[in-house]
Amino acid sequence: MPSQLKKSFLQKIGGENRPVWFVFSGMGSQWNGMGKDLLRIPVFAQVIDECNTILKPKGIDIFNILTTDDPTIFDDIIHSFVGIVAVQVSSTSIASPFSLTFRESS
C-alpha cells in the first residue's frame, strides 16, 4: 500500500481516535468466486486457511466455495453461510496492518 494512502487512512479526525465499525451483510450477498481476488492478500488467505482447517473435517472446502465458478455452489445454504462468514472474518484481519484494534461494544 502506498505510504500516502496509509497515512490518510490512519489520520485522526479532530485530534481524537475514532471507533471503527464493521457492518456485515447477511444471506443473499454471496456470488461465485467472491473470495478469489481477496485470497491474493496474504493475511486474508491465512485466516481463510485457518477456517479451512476447522471446516475440512466437516466436509466443507472453503477454498472451493470462495473460488469456484460453479453456478450451483450456493444452492446449498451451508455453502452460502460459511462462505459469507469466512469472508467477513477474514476481511477484519486485513485491518491489522493498519494498527486498528477491536473491542467488544458495551
Image (cartoon, rainbow, N blue to C red):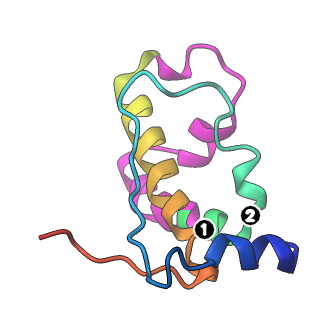
Which residue position holds label 2? 41
In the image, taking residue 73 as reference, residue 17 lies left or right, namely left
Q: Circle 2 — which element?
A: loop
Q: Are marks 2 and 1 in contact (CB under 8 Å)?
A: yes
Dot 2 or dot 1, earlier in sequence: 2
Q: In the displayed structure, would residue 25 be above or below residue 28?
A: below
Q: Main secondary structure of the magenta part?
A: helix
Q: Circle 1 — which element?
A: loop
Give the magenta range: 48-74
Q: In the displayed structure, would residue 60 be above or below residue 15?
A: above
Around disc 1, counting alpha carbons within 10 Å, would you say few (fewer than 14), some (14 to 19), or many (20 or more)? Answer: some
- Quadrant assignment for the N terminus: bottom right
Q: Position of residue 30 (x, y in %)?
A: 52, 28
Tally of marks: 2
> In the image, what residue occupies the spot 52% across and 60% down?
90
Which residue position holds label 1? 94
Task: Give, as a three-letter code, the residue at label 2.
Answer: Ile
Task: Give, as a three-letter code, the residue at label 1.
Answer: Ile
> In the image, what residue occupies the spot 38% across and 59% down?
21
